[in-house]
Image (tube, rainbow, N blue to C red):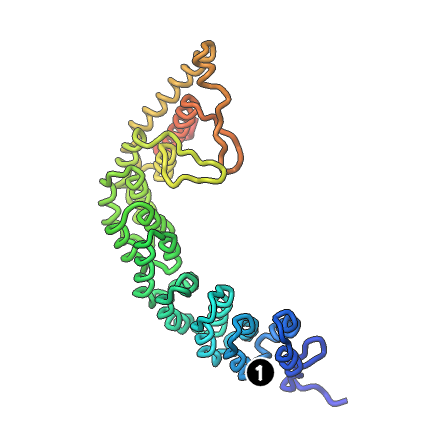
Amino acid sequence: MAPAFAGDKPEPKYEGKPLAYWVAQFQKGDTAEQRAPAAEALKAFGPDAAPALPTFIEMLADRSPAYRSQVLVIVAAIGPAAKAARPAVLNALRSKPAFDFGHDRFALNALLAISPEPKDVVSALAPLLEDQRLGGGVYEQLCAIGPPAKDALPALRRYVLSKVAEGITEPVWTLASVGPDVVPLLLELLEAHQGRSRYEALRCLEALGPKAASAGPALQKLLAHHDPHTRYRAAVLLWACNNSSDGVPVLAELLTQLPTRVEKERYTVSRHFSAHDAVQTLSEIGPKARAALPELRRLVSTGFAVGIVAGVGLSSPEGARALATNYRVNSDGSLTPRTPYHELMELGRAADAAIAKIEQKPNP
């Protein structure tokens, strides 16, 4: 028996049958269901299916989106060895016989899988953001690529601003994955827009953290914003992005302006902030938050006082009603009393813990 040499690679097979057999089987199928077994086999070949790439490229010219979708999955499985199929994949993506978003997703996935360099994908996808049918999927794919997508920032900016103008602000948050190069666009959104888009821009800056340090001057301006929730977020971000405690006086002021707690029901989480959130932030800032100690001590005194009142109130009908079974359902399903007494006592305890953190003393 002749020895097998390392260079003698056997012909790959699936269920004992070679690549050519499965290509022929795929072509014989009249429906997606009939082609499915052959499609699974061809996908299993992976890069070893590259010799059949010219045939797959021809198949991508078919007018049926369902047919092309199956071919696109096979091409994606081949990976970078199928990079010659890029023009055909782009043509399949641009074709508009029907609003088949599943087909679009398969085409985008194939384009990413066969492109060895992320920059190649970015340059191919950026012009497609202008296509109303493809824009959303293309935008998500570009952001998923991460920092290399910064080369498409002009197109990304046009897309985001057009969506914000329509009242659609969710794309703003996705920008964080592109990295710090999106900070100028986020600052533009902070300056020119309000409401939900501003919230999403601030949320995106929070995700970037220290990478968004260049946003410091804009955040400083927001400390004087008329909306207390915006002031809170700006103070938090100055600490998160710039390690700056400049927002501490604002946080101390908000201890008396924000609601004691923001209701967070099981299925609806509020996007606003509470005095309890401000206390928690001051605790995280630690010794640099010493300017807030007077306000925190007042909260401790208030919490202690209402605890006494609540205890005495139990003997009166009014006190009993105040501490009756009125509960809030938390996001994790647990129950928290909804009465002012409980809220203030809870806030006082949190303030006491924050003071210990700021003064670097053990919490009693």
Left or right, residue 50 beside residue 223? right
Dot 1: element: helix
Left or right, residue 77 beside residue 204? right
Q: Which residue is drawn at 44% across and 79% down?
A: 87
Between 238 and 324, the one lying in front of the other is: 324
Assess disc 1: are there few (<14), some (14-19) or many (≥20) residues with their C-alpha within 10 Å of its C-alpha: some
Q: Quadrant of the C terminus?
A: top left
* Amino acid type at mark 1: Ala
Q: Residue at x 60, y 73 (%)?
A: 43
Residue 145 x, y percent position in the rendering = 42, 64
Q: Is residue 364 above or below residue 211?
A: above
Q: How many labels does the image show?
A: 1
Residue 66 x, y percent position in the rendering = 55, 70
Q: Name the residue under label 1.
A: 52
Q: Is residue 271 visible?
A: yes
Q: Which residue is drawn at 39% across and 24% down?
A: 344
